[in-house]
Image: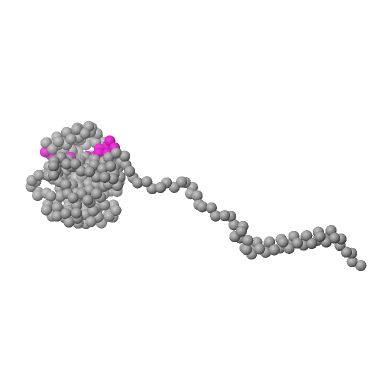
């Protein structure tokens, strides 16, 4: 005869069976994935390893000044920023203009030239170089590899050697600083047969403003520049007109990409070359470019704080 379970034992048995049933149901739910949404950890936003710094516009301190010194039918450009100095070309062999450059530098209390850039060895660009090298402390000098068998070229090399100046060949794409102004060498891109095309071409940037210094680069060099660089590389506010405003420079290809608002022409009053040529002036006008000329305005000084542009003229327009 079977024994009956006591009431307490029945309750314990029912409790055990109920627990087993709950565990079986939980296991079914777990392994079927039904509970996944409830078991997942709440989403949290990704936190970068390092804090993100918002983009800050390049706002340099102080000013950049570019002096297009009136040295007649020649070039001499003084660049000043942050207490540092770059002199691009040194006028012709005319002693009066060499004295003018020296006096101009001394009037600005300049005793050291951080960078002397002799764009190419024509006499109207290196004429005052020996006297300037001997009269000031020149830290570095950029010159192209183009060689001329002229007395002024030999005298320039002798002065550089005598004063132990560090002479550098222009390395395309390299950048050096004058204060907070950035100077990028764009050309010469080839070993040219023509001295003018061998000119060192520099893009000068200060904040959001920029200047293209072209020496005497002509159409062959300009064509290589246009084919090598994008519009973003060449877009500038101010163009130093190549080769004194000659028709052989300032090609439409260059103007299309550089798209300057201003062009500065360094040339001598009544010069025998007819610079600037009428074709160049008309080309600038067709592009809406405002033109300033040293033969009409004397020395031209460009000042920028990296945002605004201001021009001052030695003579009234």
Residue 181: x and y, percent? 29, 42
Whether residue 117 is visible, yes or no, is no
The residue under the point 19% across, 52% down is 289
Residue 161: x and y, percent? 22, 36
The residue under the point 81% across, 59% down is 12
Q: Quadrant of residue 32?
A: bottom right
Whether residue 63 is visible, yes or no, is yes
Q: On the rendered structure, is 22 left or right of 264?
A: right
Number of numbered discs: 0
Give the vertical position of 56 relative to 21 (above or below).
above
Q: Nearer the viewer, residue 195 or 22?
A: 22
Colour mapping: one colour
Q: Which image quarter is the N terminus in? A: bottom right
Q: Nearer the viewer, residue 22 or 67?
A: 22
- Quick one: which residue is furthest to the bottom in this view? 1
> Which residue range is magenta in the image?
80-94
The residue under the point 21% across, 57% down is 253
Residue 297: x and y, percent? 14, 43
Q: Nearer the viewer, residue 20 or 214?
A: 20
Q: Which image quarter is the C terminus in? A: top left
Give the vertical position of 101 relative to 239 (above or below).
above
Q: Nearer the viewer, residue 223 or 179?
A: 179
Residue 88: x and y, percent? 21, 42
Q: Is residue 88 magenta?
A: yes
The residue under the point 12% across, 52% down is 277
- Quick one: which residue is furthest to the right in this view? 1
Q: Is residue 296 magenta?
A: no
């Amino acid at each position: 005869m079977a024994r009956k379970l006591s009431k307490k034992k029945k309750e314990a048995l029912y409790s055990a069976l109920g627990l087993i049933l709950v565990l079986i149901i939980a296991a079914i739910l777990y392994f079927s994935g039904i509970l996944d949404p409830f078991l997942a950890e709440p989403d949290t936003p990704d936190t970068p390893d390092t804090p993100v710094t918002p983009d800050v516009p390049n706002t340099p301190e102080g000013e950049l000044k570019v002096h297009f010194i009136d040295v007649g039918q020649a070039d001499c450009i003084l660049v000043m920023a942050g207490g540092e100095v770059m002199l691009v070309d040194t006028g012709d062999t005319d002693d009066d203009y060499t004295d003018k450059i020296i006096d101009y530098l001394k009037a600005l209390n300049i005793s050291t030239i951080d960078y002397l850039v002799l764009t190419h060895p024509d006499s109207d660009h290196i004429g005052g170089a020996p006297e300037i090298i001997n009269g000031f402390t020149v830290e570095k000098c950029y010159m192209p590899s183009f060689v001329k068998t002229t007395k002024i070229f030999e005298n320039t090399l002798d002065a550089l050697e005598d004063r132990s100046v560090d002479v550098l060949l222009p390395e395309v794409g390299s950048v050096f600083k004058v204060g907070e102004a950035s100077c990028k060498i764009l050309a010469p891109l080839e070993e040219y047969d023509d001295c003018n095309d061998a000119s060192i071409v520099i893009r000068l940037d200060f904040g959001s403003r920029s200047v293209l210094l072209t020496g005497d680069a002509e159409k062959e060099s300009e064509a290589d520049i246009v084919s090598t660089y994008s519009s973003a590389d060449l877009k500038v506010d101010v163009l130093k007109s190549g080769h004194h405003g000659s028709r052989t420079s300032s090609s439409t290809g260059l103007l299309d990409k550089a798209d300057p608002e201003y062009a500065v022409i360094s040339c001598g009053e009544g010069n025998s070359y007819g610079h600037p040529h009428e074709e160049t002036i008309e080309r600038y006008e067709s592009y809406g470019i405002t033109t300033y000329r040293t033969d009409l305005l004397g020395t031209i000084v460009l000042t920028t704080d990296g945002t605004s542009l201001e021009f001052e003229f030695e003579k009234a327009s």
